[in-house]
Image: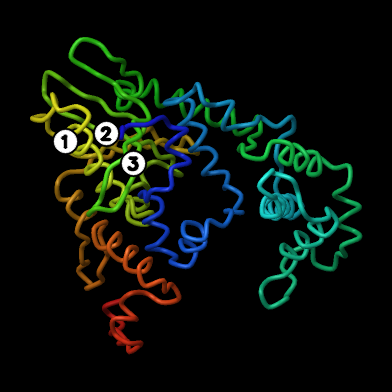
Amino acid sequence: MENTITEKQYRVNDRLSYSAVKEFDGNRIKFYKKYILKEEDDEVPSTAILLGNLCDCKLFSPETFDDKFHIATCNKGSGQLWDAVDELCAITVKSLDKDLKVTRPFDEMLKEAFESVKYDKKRQEVKFKGKTFEWFVTNFTGSEAEAYYKECRSVFGKDVVDLNLISASEKIIEELQTCEWTKAIINAKTEEDIEVVDQLAILYDVQGVPFKGMPDRVIINHKDKTITPYDMKISYTGEDFGYNYWKMKYYLQVASYYLALHYWKKVDRPELADYDIPGIEFIVGSSTLQSNPLLYSTNQININEGLYGFTTKAGNRYKGLYELVKEIEWHKKEQVWRNSKEVYDNKGKMIIKPFEEI
């Protein structure tokens, strides 16, 4: 079996990945529905996620742009009407059958979208205050919001982006390509002692469990005998990435890429056996262009934190990749998902931590 595959093959492969493990660690039930029951993910990608995906695609796999994105003919607006459109898109996606045909009446979906945005879980009005569904239909019909929804509905399977977002991505990319700190990495080409591989999709195992990983860019320096994977992120200012690294559990991604590349060089590129993988680098652009693009480096300490987990000075324990993969396999074997493995191990008896340890 080949251990490197195309990006398209990677996307449909149902092995575990960093994203899946992060989902499990943050929301076990959501993981169960998405990765075990294979329920459709009806969440509409946020603007920030779409911006990151755009930059990623344009820089590292531009040939796939038309397969991934549809450029809307109108710009997406903001406000409660557009919030309802996002909800309507999500509801519509959830109603699709295997042939991508909508199975619910449009009026029914439209009313559900309106009420989902209008009320919170306690049925308290939070938006469209004092407005009726009939008022909403009148304002939606013939509006740019309706036109945008119809475009989204015509291209299911693709992310819909407007010209404003395209423009924003182009500005970020220009900064990445011209900034003295990032341009050498972004503009790197295979030549002489340097080998550049983009979107390197790797199939490997983590403790015997099928896994997959795909760094945005891998630069192999044959002179220095190093293999350095790079992953691009977009944050608000760039300098806030140090906080986002922990919040988004990127230490798990660091660990997964480290294992993937060690497996790749051993199985697919044995001539690189004595090459070092010093760490994973993050190329971070600013969505607001408030700061220059930055490079964040990791080292063996960060890699070990991602692999084995770590404990903060306050005594809080954060699980590593090995432990989380083991827990996922335990849940799959026992077919129990309502509570964590820790709860089952303790037979439902838990301990309240002192406040200073929280």
* Nearer-N-terminus badge (3/1): 3
Q: Nearer the viewer, residue 342 or 299?
A: 342
Please give left or right for residue 336 compared with residue 161 in the image: left
Please give left or right for residue 130 compared with residue 241 in the image: right
Q: Looking at the picture, how far across and down is residue 122, in whole percent? A: 68, 78
| Residue at the outermost top position | 192
What's the amino acid at mark 2?
Answer: Pro
Task: Give the residue pinned by disc 3.
Answer: 213
Q: Looking at the picture, how far across and down is residue 163, in whole percent? A: 65, 29
Place residue 120 in its image quadrant: bottom right
Quadrant, the N terminus: top left
Please give left or right for residue 25 compared with residue 125 in the image: left
Please give left or right for residue 5 compared with residue 228 in the image: right
Task: Give the residue pinned by disc 1.
Answer: 277
Task: In the rendered view, tell whether residue 88 sits above or below residue 316.
Answer: above
What's the amino acid at mark 3?
Answer: Gly
Quadrant, the C terminus: bottom left
| Residue at the outermost left position | 274
Q: Residue at point 72% right, 75% down?
A: 124
| Callout in the foreground (2, 3) | 3
* Nearer-N-terminus badge (2/3): 3
**How many residues crowd around disc 1 within 10 Å: few (fewer than 14), some, or many (20 or more)?**
some
Q: Residue at point 11% right, 30% down?
A: 273
What SS does tag 1 mark? loop
Circle number at residue 229: 2
